[in-house]
Amino acid sequence: GLAIGLALTLIHLISIPVTNTSVNPARSTSQALFVGDWALGQLWLFWVAPIIGAAIAGLVYKALAPNKD
């Protein structure tokens, strides 16, 4: 919990002043709908990347976690 919150805070503190970053797919979707063309072309990344990252994290955890049997 705390580590995730601190990491998210750090991401925002560093990247918002530089690129106006968005780490929330719902916010990215709404902004892309208003901006249109090029933003809609990049929108898929905001939905696909977290899903792929979660799948990779699950596989790594399964491979490295101690066996409970």
Image (cartoon, grey):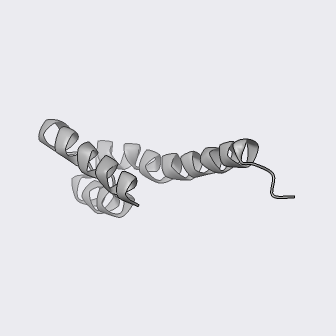
Give the residue at the far right of this rendering.
69
Left/right placement of residue 13 relative to residue 43 reads left
Query: Residue at point 67% right, 42% down?
Result: 60
Left/right placement of residue 33 relative to residue 48 reads left
Q: Position of residue 41 (x, y in %)?
A: 39, 44
- Count of residue discs: 0
Name the residue nearer the viewer: 29 or 20.
Answer: 20
Query: Residue at point 39% right, 43% down?
Result: 42
Name the residue nearer the viewer: 17 or 35.
Answer: 17
Name the residue nearer the viewer: 27 or 10.
Answer: 10
Give the residue at the far left of this rendering.
17
Q: The C terminus lies in which quarter of the figure?
A: bottom right
Name the residue nearer the viewer: 20 or 30.
Answer: 20
Query: Residue at point 57% right, 51% down?
Result: 54
Q: Position of residue 43 (x, y in %)?
A: 40, 49
Q: The N terminus lies in which quarter of the figure?
A: bottom left
Q: Position of residue 26 (x, y in %)?
A: 35, 64
Give the residue at the far top of this rendering.
18
Query: Residue 38 lies in what quarter of the image?
Result: top left
Query: Residue at point 42% right, 50% down?
Result: 46
Left/right placement of residue 40 relative to residue 51 reads left
Query: As displayed, is residue 24 above or below residue 20?
Result: below
